[in-house]
Amino acid sequence: MGITFGTDGWRAVVGKDFNKDNVTTATNAIAKYIFDNFGMNKKIIIGYDPRNMADIFSMQCAEILADFGFEVLYSKSVIPTPVLAYNAKHLNACAIMFTASHNPPEYLGLKFIPDYAGPATSDITDEIMYNLGVKFKGFGKSEIRHYNFKPDYFAHMQKLVDYKKIRELSENIIFDGLYSASIGYFDKILENNGIKFDTLHMHHDPNFGGGMPEPKPKYLKELIEKVKSEPNSIGFANDGDADRFGVINEDGEYVSPNEIIAILLMHLKKNKHMEGPLVKTVGASLLLDKVAEKLGVEVIETAVGFKHVGEAMRKFNPIIGGEESGGLSIKGHIPEKDGLLANSLILEAMAYENKSLKQLQHNLYEFAGCKFYNDRIDKKLENKDEIKPLLGKYKDLKSIGEYNVIRTDTRDGVKLYLEDTTSWILVRPSGTEPLLRIYFESDSTDKIEKLKSVII
């Protein structure tokens, strides 16, 4: 069968494990979960990103659910995950999104989004996994209704973001559609508000132009060159389903998600007078802790993965919640990462401060008192049996090189905080392969290289 629901649903290679039979089995399991927890009157909304066969498999899912008797609303076109998620909350519906996010083009995925509009928690995915071997018969038959989910999401964004203020910006905005689901959404939001912008790669392509649908520097080379060649420009891109963001500053430099989250925390607190804590993962930068401390904002730390961030957002109602891999959301929105919102908020912060993004970065580091650097390496193992003993070995470390370990956190792997108060190491296992991901942060690249030489 080969179906496993992880942090962000089930993903597999199209034509191999992601096939007609397995989509039927997964849809059946979700149908049983919805019926057992909400009954037959719960609406189900379905969307898909531009990936190969995403439209075909999503329609197959819709037809099965309609045959069971559920009311099914099916997206009229390609849709970003955050847009579908927002509509789950707005319409009090459960959502199923066909996407593999930033994974390679040969992958497709199926993500279940409950009516609270955030990632499904482990108890929900465990119940769906249990249902994989159970047959659901349904009750009668209903029709599939094709639905436009854009208007309500756009109306909500107008309440969250001051686009009128953004119109005052002098920067040249360049949006790299990156062949992704953000096309027809981020550009339309800007267009609807009379905000001028230039574009790249503005058509849907299941092969994502031969690259990866991931807004990281190695896949944004054309955007970076365009920003560099056109003075006073700033660049934006999103991943395949537009829940992650990538931002390029006026010098053509990639701005890390940690910096973006910190800049937005400062903006939302100062300019929009938001109150509440900050939610971040154990893999996110100490930069966020330093900024939060100076703003008088409490920090709630979670395990890695937006599933945990979203759960904490529902519980603590923070100003902002984010993760180091490029996902964030804010108070008043949904507990799910939204790259369209992130792009919009950066423009809003620039407009409120009347400063370039480069200036906002400079102000951030002045405020924090120091700059942080990050790195990650993957330590490949022979088999998964090696993981537990190795984690135990890291957990028992009292010093690393010349630095003593002052605190150890084991909520997600092993995180070691060092006595210089600006350095840490996080060792956590991959969920799918026999390897350890080892994250480093410090206030200098030399320190990181020294730590790497000792820890590997």
Image (cartoon, rainbow, N blue to C red):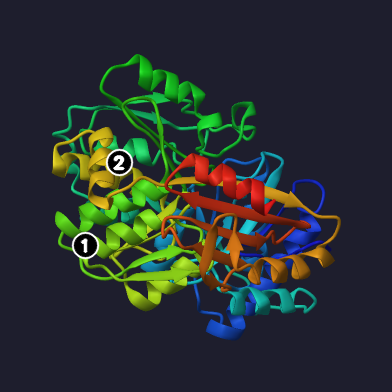
* Residue 325 visible in the current orientation: no
Q: Element type at marker 2?
A: helix
Q: How many marks?
A: 2
At 14% from the left and 54% from the top, the residue drawn is 271
Point out the frontmost of discs 2 and 1. 1
In the figure, is residue 187 to the left or right of 325? left
Task: State the residue in front, 218 or 203.
Answer: 218
Q: Which mark is residue 324?
A: none
The part of the image, by quadrant, that contains residue 309 is bottom left
At 56% from the left and 84% from the top, the residue drawn is 37
Measuring from the top left, give residue 272's x and y in whole percent: 16, 57
- Crowdedness of circle 2 by 10 Å Cα count: few (<14), some, many (20+)? some
Provide the residue designation for mark 2. 189
Task: Residue lying at the far front in this picture: please name it.
Answer: 402
> Compared to 299, does 211 lie above or below?
above
At 48% from the left and 21% from the top, the residue drawn is 222
In the image, what residue type sits under mark 1?
Answer: Leu
- Kindly check if marks 2 and 1 are in contact, taking CB atoms under 8 A apart as contact: no
In the figure, is residue 173 to the left or right of 167? right
- Crowdedness of circle 1 by 10 Å Cα count: few (<14), some, many (20+)? some
Task: State the residue in front, 259 or 90.
Answer: 259
The part of the image, by quadrant, that contains residue 354 is top left
Task: Residue lying at the far top in this picture: please name it.
Answer: 229
Task: State the residue in front, 131 or 2.
Answer: 2
Measuring from the top left, give residue 177's x and y in whole percent: 45, 32
Q: Element type at marker 1?
A: helix
Provide the residue designation for mark 1. 295
